[in-house]
Image: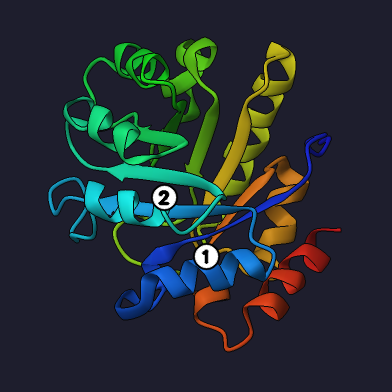
Amino acid sequence: MPRSSKPIRIAPSILAADFARLGEEVRSAEESGADWIHVDVMDGRFVPNITVGTPIVAALRKVTQSVLDVHLMIVEPERYVEGFAAAGADVITVHAEATTHLHRTLTQVRDLGARAGVSLNPHTPEEAIRYVLDETDLVLVMSVNPGFGGQTFIDATTRKVERIREWIDASGRDIDLEVDGGIKTGTAKRMVQAGADVLVAGSAIFGQTDYRQAIQALREDVT
């Protein structure tokens, strides 16, 4: 299985950061070598947790020049994408399971000037996104069940990433392939070998005392 031709990007998830000093945490991650900042938005309905909304994205936009990678784990995301785009999200990812008209929602995100992402839960077959790849700039494969950080990587994810990599390469389109959940040294290498080129890591970075060392460990793992 060929690796992605793109450079590997590391996206620390603020879900594992200290929210009492979130701006400082994001700046520290950026200065330590992070490429993107991953923002997990949860509504307590699609997933059993509630996190942040547009005010946090707007606040983070003021303190970082990094890509704000906003992952909407919410039902009916089409109702909220305009607000997140206005707040400064660079990438807005919606779940295939959460919106009835996925093609329309992805088009809506692009029309708002953001890059459109689509995410799949571990149990969702990759076929669910095959016919929207032309409207997609990023595919996010969940390698844990969404809702909480610090979970154990689900091994069955590997083959799904491999298949989606095959589709992306065959399409000839510039689509990022991102993986989120249980990413640390070891699983990071497996996902990059399977074809991922964006790695979301929460506790593997923000749960460590030295962010630079943690990010470097992930980079060394995938080389």
Which callout, 2 or 1, points at the residue further toward the start of the chain? 2
The answer to whether residue 122 of the structure is visible from this angle is no
In the displayed structure, 26 sits above or below 117; it is below
Q: Residues within 10 Å of mark 2 (few under 14, many from 20)?
A: some
Specify the quadrant that holds the N terminus: top right
Disc 1 marks which residue?
182
Mark 2 residue type: Arg
> Cα distance, mark 2 to mark 1?
26 Å
Is disc 1 placed on a helix, strand or loop?
loop
Q: Position of residue 64 (x, y in %)?
A: 51, 56
Q: Position of residue 55 (x, y in %)?
A: 23, 52
In front: 23, or 166?
Answer: 23
Which color scheme is applied?
Answer: rainbow
The answer to whether residue 182 of the structure is visible from this angle is yes
Q: Nearer the viewer, mark 2 or mark 1?
A: 2
Does residue 20 appear to the left or right of 204 in the view shown?
left
> Which numbered dot is residue 61?
2
Mark 1 residue type: Gly
Q: Residue at x 22, y 42 (%)?
A: 74
Q: Residues within 10 Å of mark 1 (few under 14, many from 20)?
A: many
